[in-house]
Image: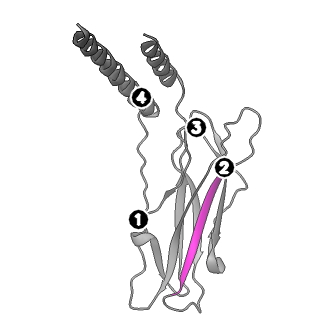
């Protein structure tokens, strides 16, 4: 009986607790995660910072590249992402030097981290990182066409509770299995 009460208590806790929200980067699509450009050519590459939480989130976005070929356009010290906004854009200009050798590869690393918040702000201590490669190509090769994702699908109102629902189903199945096990065990003793 104690096990059943314990399982019901765990079930209640998991359905009442809010789901932990994560933050990350949505990047423009690049085949093989590589942006291919000619020497002297430039391109704008973008990432979006989604926030599915009910509170605004303050983040710091940094980008580093070998050869210093990437610069954030209109950088901000702290990006304030409104609640439920999925497409806060950060655009970067990638500029390949005129004298870059064909085949040269530059690595670009991006990092997103929680920023110090004012009182009452949602804070998080995690960080997210991602990156891509920039490759210098020859004159006969075609530059990468960046596939920009323009539309975002709003998550349904039930999606933040998907974990809670999954846990609920697992707990209910465990309780049912426990009840059946006890019934069969009692029948064996008779």
Note whether 2 is above or below 104 in the view shown: above
Q: Is residue 157 visible?
A: no
Q: What distance separates the C-alpha of mark 2 from that of mark 1?
A: 25 Å
* Of the image marks 4 and 2, the number of the one nearer the N terminus: 2
* Of the image marks 4 and 1, the number of the one nearer the N terminus: 1
Question: Mark 4 and 1 residues: CB-CB less than 8 Å, in contact?
Answer: no
Category of crowding for the residue at label 3, using alpha-carbon neighbours closer than 10 angstroms: few (below 14), some (14–19), many (at least 20): some
Which residue is label 3 attached to?
83
Foreground: 31 or 88? 31
In this rendering, would 14 be left or right of 60? left
Q: Residue at x 44, y 33 (%)?
A: 163
Q: Residue furthest front?
A: 189
Which residue is label 1 attached to?
147
* Of the image marks 4 and 3, the number of the one nearer the N terminus: 3
Category of crowding for the residue at label 2, using alpha-carbon neighbours closer than 10 angstroms: few (below 14), some (14–19), many (at least 20): many
**Which secondary structure lies at badge 2?**
strand
In this rendering, would 56 be left or right of 190? right
Closer mark to the observer between disc 4 and disc 1: 4
Residue 13, position as x, y percentages in the image? 52, 21
Which residue is label 2 attached to?
59
Closer mark to the observer between disc 4 and disc 3: 4
Residue 164 tag number: none
């Amino acid at each position: 009986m104690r096990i059943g009460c314990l399982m019901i208590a765990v079930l209640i806790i998991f359905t009442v607790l809010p789901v932990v929200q994560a933050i990350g980067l949505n990047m423009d699509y690049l085949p093989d995660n590589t942006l291919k450009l000619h020497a002297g050519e430039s391109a704008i590459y973008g990432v979006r910072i989604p926030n599915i939480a009910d509170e605004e989130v303050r983040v710091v976005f940094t980008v580093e590249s070998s050869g210093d070929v990437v610069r954030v356009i209109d950088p901000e010290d702290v990006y304030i992402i409104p609640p439920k906004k999925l497409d806060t854009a950060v655009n970067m200009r990638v500029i390949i030097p005129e004298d870059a050798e064909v085949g040269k590869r530059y690595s670009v690393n991006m990092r997103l981290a929680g920023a110090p918040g004012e009182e009452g702000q949602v804070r998080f201590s995690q960080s997210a990182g991602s990156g891509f490669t920039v490759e210098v190509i020859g004159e006969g090769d075609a530059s990468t066409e960046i596939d920009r994702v323009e539309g975002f699908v709003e998550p349904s109102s039930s999606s933040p509770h998907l974990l809670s629902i999954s846990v609920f189903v697992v707990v209910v199945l465990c309780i049912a299995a426990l009840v059946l096990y006890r019934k069969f065990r009692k029948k064996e003793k008779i």
